[in-house]
Image: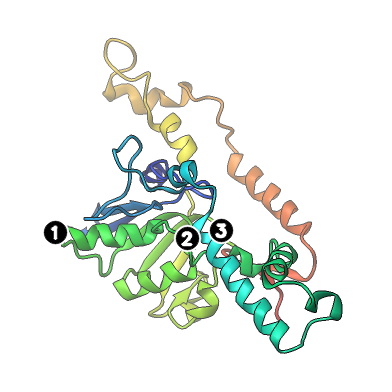
Amino acid sequence: MHQANAMALRSSDERRQVGAVIVTRTKRSDPTIMDADIVASGMNEVPRREGGFYWEGEFVDARDQALRRSSPVDLEDRIKADVLREIATRLKRANWLAPDYAILEEVELSDRLRKLLKRTQFMDISEFMRQVHAEMAALVDAAKRGVAVRGGEMYVTTFPCHSCAKHIIAAGITKVVYLEPYPKSRADMLHKEEIALDPADPQTVGDKGLFVAFTGVAPRQYARLFSMAARGHKKGLPLNTWNDERSTLSPQYVIANAAQAYTRTEREELERLPKEYKWNRAVLCPAQE
């Protein structure tokens, strides 16, 4: 997950930086030991012709931020505005509008409709964004180099959206480990026959792909915990005494029961949610009857 988080830092997406890595496992002669190799990686970024993604400082930069320097128009917003204008025109021609709205031009109608629908599911859809999602970028990275990913695992910093989920399923990825939830995703609803979210329930897993929350050392703490800055024969402890003495070394600021404290805080926050909502590990959605 630390590697996936590092990939996310490469993204210039202003909404959310996402990173993903694909891991394959190979058994050794000893069946209890397996090698894990990162075979592909990706982040959400605008694609560049001839393959790859745009970087800062290139002669040609077609990322969203660069395009806005010459034009304030957001292309994704423009498409949504066109869709709303088409809907407003249909409603007007079908005489479905109140008199006060029927006299307005289509452009004015669409502008008002857009303000009315602000923060709704329609305005939050990401199908028109220009960035390649991190999960897809990792799959493309593997395909571009001829690396097999079937049977592999994916570590991603955010729960996959429904569009990425179907590509992950089609690629044969058997397990996805995510760091953060993503309420906009409809992956579980659209692909419940192929995805299992609860590893504790054997009846729901079976041959399905498993999407599970990450448990372990968070990326922000990883470097602090494993830097071993005090190790070394001249500046610190030699390797043969490191394991015996490491409990007395930094970082001593890590609380022993930090995990329990986090779990308790998380539960307290979930209790504050409205009763009509439920939490199913990955997706926050209205409770179903």
Looking at the image, which is closer to me, 177 or 99?
Answer: 99
Residue shown at 60% from the left, 39% from the top: 258
Q: Residues within 10 Å of mark 1 (few under 14, many from 20)?
A: few
Which residue was labeled with disc 3? 181
The colour mode here is rainbow
**Are the residues tagged 2 and 1 within 8 Å (C-beta)?**
no
Looking at the image, which is closer to me, 2 or 114?
Answer: 114
Residue shown at 31% from the left, 57% from the top: 138
Q: Secondary structure at mark 3?
A: loop
Sequence-first tag of 2 and 1 = 1
As drawn, the label of residue 129 is 2
What is the residue that sits farthest to the top in this orientation? 234
Sequence-first tag of 1 and 3 = 1
Looking at the image, which is closer to me, 198 or 157?
Answer: 157
In the picture provided, is 34 more to the left or to the right than 229? left
As drawn, the label of residue 29 is 1
Q: CA distance from mark 2 to mark 3?
A: 20 Å
